[in-house]
Amino acid sequence: MLHRKMNLKKVFLSLATTIVGITTGYSQTYSDVRTIFINKCASCHNTQSNETPFPLETFTDISKKLQTIKEVVTNNIMPPWLADPHYREFSNDRSLSKNEKQKIIDWINLGAPEGTPIKGKPNQMNKQNNRPADLSLEIQKPFLVKGDNKEKFVLFKVPFELSEEKNIEAIEFFSNNRRIVHHANYMFCSVPDKSVNLNQGPAFIDDTQNTGIANTSEYESFKKNPVYYTGWIPGTSTEYYPQNFGWKLPKRGVVLFTVHYSGTPIDQNSIIGVKLHFKKAKIEREIRVISLGSGGIGEEAIFPNFIISPNKISTFSLKIRTPEDQSLMYVWPHMHYLGKEFSAYAITPTNDTINLVRIPKWDFKWQEMYRMKKLVKIPAGSLLSISGTYDNTTSNPNNPHSPPVYVFSSGNMISTDEMFTLLLIYSPYKEGDEDIEL
């Protein structure tokens, strides 16, 4: 009798699933929502990540967190995406569409039926680079971040020697413990002179006492031939380049990492490095990076002077003209804990407005290098206009100062100071670039 009741329950659930699926058009089994979880969730929630508390790669993973998933999806908490989609759409948008959101909720309401089991885990690389990295460059041994609750700036040197130069298609920062990394900048430098010992000098320079990388002279000789410069901030996804765009990794050189560690109450080991993906296609379109604002070009033109008064909500702006026709690939806004709003646009010489990015509710925990859907032409002479609003009041729960104090930008970029920065990743414009999809 009990067996018969159980069979009736399965029949009823199956029938209900079919009826709801027919009447609503929404998903009925896991196979119908699996792609959504792969594209919008598993890129962060995977077994290789140390930033997320659990994976969402398989049906088994997801079935353990159904109520949590339903709650964060219903309340638009996850997946996190801060850019205003009405201002500018981006190709790496992690947010759920109305239809995707409804599919997940309806599937869970139906009891989350599995359907035909799907074996294995999805590959966690992005769709453009659905393969493992071709080369990983990392520090020689773990660095001990002492548990003294103090922020630290550490410069690492990672040498490399290859049989030939490589065309770079994608680049991704990695760490065994990203939770303690405030941000990381890194530069690839060519050292073709074989008389120069790549291993000379220390493997790292720890400037914990001075907090600001004051003594880096031992690495200066490696910076004579810089090749490419980029970085990582919380939330950032893989940086990649389409078609014949990219940059060339030299046969011989070093990677210089500047890593800003957040304060931690306990000793923790840190391994950092970078994963590189090669492309066979010849690099014909050079990728360039430019930093605007505090710590970059136009810092002196920020209006008013970039000093954030206590107990006030303050807005700062920067207007600067672009000197050449650019094909814009990524925009990368950056602020710290006082950040409230960020926006950037360009006005062309013919008075057309090009929206670049708008973050209406800034959150330091979720930053991104926003990738355009197609290359965006910024004509020479365009006026780039950048605006940042900061909440230095007691109403800001993220304010690191209690009571609020004067805050400004300094060379060491510690998190209790502030930044007002926009990085542009672009290539010199060629006719037809506007049609190239990213």
Image: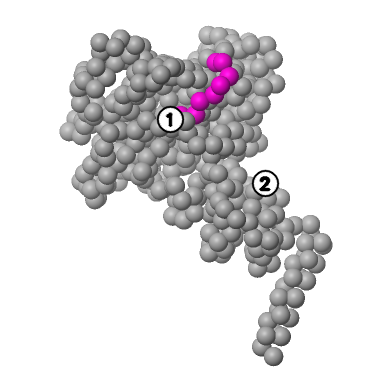
Q: Against 93, is 432 above or below?
A: above
Residue at (28, 34) in percent of width and height:
140
Residue nearer the viewer, 61 or 146: 61
Alpha-carbon span between mark 2 and mark 1:
35 Å
Give amino acid for label 2.
Ser
- In the rendered view of the protein, which quadrant contains the N terminus? bottom right
Magenta stretch: dominant SS? loop
Q: How is the image coloured?
A: one colour
Residue 234, picture quadrant:
top left
Residue 135, picture quadrant:
top left
Q: Residue 261: x percent and y percent?
A: 30, 38
Residue nearer the viewer, 115 or 83: 115
Is 345 covered by the magenta stretch?
A: no
Residue 377 appearing in the image: yes
Q: Residue 332: x percent and y percent?
A: 49, 29
**Would you name the residue on which mark 2 appears?**
97
Residue 142, picture quadrant:
top left
Element on which disc 1 rests: strand
Residue at (50, 20) in percent of width and height:
167
Residue numbers of the magenta segment: 276-283
Residue 413's disc is: none
* Disc nearest the viewer among 2 and 1: 1
Closer to the chain start, of discs 2 and 1, is 2
Give amino acid for label 1.
Leu
Query: Is mark 2 in CB contact (under 8 Å) with mark 1?
Result: no
Q: Residue 283: x percent and y percent?
A: 55, 15
Residue nearer the viewer, 46 or 382: 46
**Would you name the residue on which mark 1 appears?**
135
Q: Residue 270: x percent and y percent?
A: 30, 41
Q: List the single residue furthest toward the bottom.
A: 1
Element on which disc 2 rests: loop
Q: How many marks?
A: 2
